[in-house]
Image (spheres, helix red, strand yellow):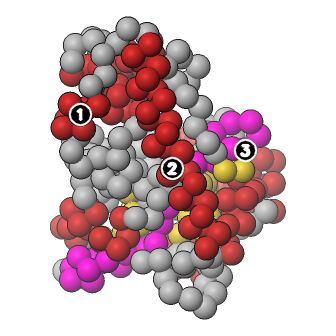
Amino acid sequence: MIRRDADLHVHTTHSDGACSPREVVVAAAQVGLAALAITDHDTVSALPDARDEAARLGVELVPGVELTCEYEGREVHLLGYFFRDHPDLTAAVDRLRAERVGRFAAMAAKLGELGLVVDLTALRRCFPRAVLGRRHLAEYLFRTKQTQTVREAFDRFLADGKPACVVKERLDAFEAIALVRAAGGVVSWAHPPFNLKLESLRTLTGAGLGAIETAGPGIQNRVGRRFRDWAEILDLVPTAGSDFHAPDRPGRRVGAVATPDADLERLRGRATGPPGPASA
């Protein structure tokens, strides 16, 4: 099989995905991808688990991470690629990871204060492989018939600003870019908001942003074309990925949206790659 293209936005059970690192690598191989980036939220712990399977199946494993950041007063997500082990980046993702654990416990406690029942032991049995987060609380409320739908659980209790929500810690976007670049990597803006302004993108580009996601399940074709035009203006690499979380989500299977080989090579060229062991 001649392999081509790369899915540069995939999640596993090490954050909020339903499949293990090995399983997403197998899925990438089955659809003929040449490369795969596992970009779990605020952690790189899946990369060692995926490395051997990727080597066995002939799929390039691109070191990746999706960092939770803040820019211009809103939450944004930045994707780091091709970075290597670096103590400052490791410390930052460890801090965010620890905050996620505390945030989950605090939201569960708030739900209890609101009169809802959250049995943490039962919840963990429902999602035995997952790193538990807000989505799992919403699904648990639905499964235990405390809400009519998962959407209702968010709308009434867990969405931003609702009574059981706890604000998550975010990295400053400029800090995140600096951390990934110091680790020899390159940064892409994940699923940018549809109302993104060119000047906002230009500012982060000046700070070292090297790419922007122009295709994915949350990016409409019209908006993606605008982002590609801006990428050309600002000399950013256009990236794309499925934002895979689970195999039952239409249009978001591994490889459903992919980055062409030529753009992957451009992205690789933007990584600074200092000496040291690769993270993947």
Q: Is residue 87 above or below residue 41?
A: below
Q: Which residue is nearer to you in this view: 165 or 246?
A: 165
Mark 3 neighbour class, 10 Å CA radius: few under 14, some 14 to 19, many 20 or more: some
Q: Residues at badges 2 and 3 in contact (C-beta under 8 Å)?
A: no
Report the Cα–Cα distance between label 2 and label 3: 22 Å
Q: Which mark is residue 121?
A: 1
Q: Which mark is residue 98?
A: 2
The residue lying at 31 percent from left, 77 percent from top is 51
In the rendered image, is residue 229 in sight? yes
Report the Cα–Cα distance between label 3 and label 1: 37 Å
Instruction: Identify the magenta region.
Output: 51-75
In the rendered image, is residue 234 in sight? no
Mark 2 neighbour class, 10 Å CA radius: few under 14, some 14 to 19, many 20 or more: few
Q: Is residue 39 above or below residue 96?
A: below
The residue lying at 56 percent from left, 88 percent from top is 276
Q: Quadrant of residue 38?
A: bottom left
259 relative position to 197: left or right: left
The residue lying at 69 percent from left, 62 percent from top is 177
Q: Is residue 202 above or below residue 277?
A: above
Looking at the rendered structure, the kind of residue marked 2 is Ala
